[in-house]
Amino acid sequence: MAEIGLGEYCDEVKELIKAQSTDEAIAICRHILERSPKYIMPYRLLGEAALEREEYDEAASLFTRVLGANPEDVIAHVGLAVVHDENKELEEAIWHLERAFELAPGNTEIRQELKRLYGEREGVEPPRVKLTPAALARLYLREGLYDRAITELRPLLKEDPDRVDLKVALAEALWREGRRREAAESCQEILELLPNCLKANLILGLIWKESGQEEEGETLLARAQALDPENGVAQELFGEASPLPPEKVLLPRLEEIPTPPPVPEVEEVAPPKPEEVVEEMAEEEMP
């Protein structure tokens, strides 16, 4: 029986979703989850497939689950923005798209869609979308200006302590700045809310392992690997110093795609507007 790596199989699923072959995409995702039930990526792909099928409640549930493991997932935020927009929940749609913009300020599709939503709310589209303080903090983090990122993030979290995405950014900035104790405290705070937060498990697992708490550290790193079996995020975060080496996890291909039940005939309606933003973001595969 032919085998394929998890990451490669997920790449194939993305192409199937783009081709609107959602039945096959869903079957493969479920097949992957039988092997790796906590793996984040198949849940995100299932969310994209549900969105393509206009199953908005299912899509929202799946994208929310993804954010429980990765509050910085751009596509999950964009997907939830689309769901809320379809449900005429303008403020919620704007909130999630603003989070996506903060994570990917250079993405043209997100900028244009955010301008459109602002136009719906204000009655006129702004000429451009300005960087928010959170977007600026993330820019500092990407550029290696960790102390400046920390300085920006602290007051934002004081103003809105429920922003778990910013807590994750702060934990990373503290760790990269060498402030291990504060980073560990930040990670512990995150894990009390989101025990499956991938980045918090990785950072705290490494800190504990380096400080001699081997067993506790290994427990967290094992949890992280269950969420990301090929350790891609660990490699991005830690590089050569990663305690989790890159893996290629193989599983058998799904030989037969289950035949979906027949769909009852319904009255023809005008075709829905394509969800171009999600498709473009999925194609770019931004972190």
Image: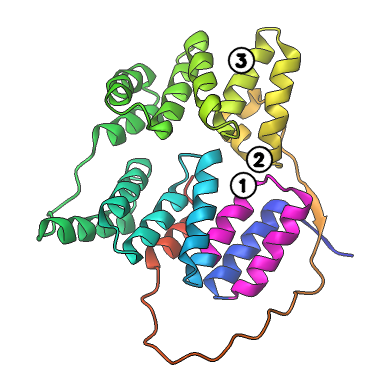
Is 26 positioned to the left or the right of 165 in the image?
right
Give the magenta range. 21-49
Return the x and y of residue 159 as percentages of the image width and height.
27, 25
Pointer 1 residue: 40
Pointer 2 residue: 227
- Please tell me which residue is depicted at 54% across the width and 91% down the height of the picture: 265
Question: Is label 2 in contact with label 1 (beta carbons under 8 Å)?
Answer: yes
- Please tell me which residue is depicted at 38% across the width and 79% down the height of the picture: 272
Pointer 3 residue: 207
Is 114 positioned to the left or the right of 68 in the image?
left
**Could you tell me which secondary element the residue under label 3 belongs to?**
helix
In the image, residue 29 lies in the stretch drawn in magenta: yes
Return the x and y of residue 8 as percentages of the image width and height.
68, 57
Cα distance between the residues tagged 3 and 2: 19 Å
Q: Residue furthest right?
A: 1
Is 76 positioned to the left or the right of 96 in the image?
right
**Who is closer to the viewer here, 22 or 121?**
121
When the figure is inspected, residue 254 is found, relative to residue 99, above or below; the finding is below
- Please tell me which residue is depicted at 56% across the width and 54% down the height of the picture: 44
When the figure is inspected, residue 118 is found, relative to residue 197, above or below; the finding is below
Q: Nearer the viewer, mark 3 or mark 1?
A: 1
**Could you tell me which secondary element the residue under label 1 belongs to?**
helix
Question: Is label 3 in contact with label 2 (beta carbons under 8 Å)?
Answer: no
**Who is closer to the viewer here, 171 or 268?**
268
Give me the disc on residue 274: none
**Could you tell me which secondary element the residue under label 2 belongs to?**
helix
Return the x and y of residue 192 as percentages of the image width and height.
54, 25
* Mark toward the start of the polypeptide (3 vs 2): 3
When the figure is inspected, residue 52 is found, relative to residue 57, above or below; the finding is below
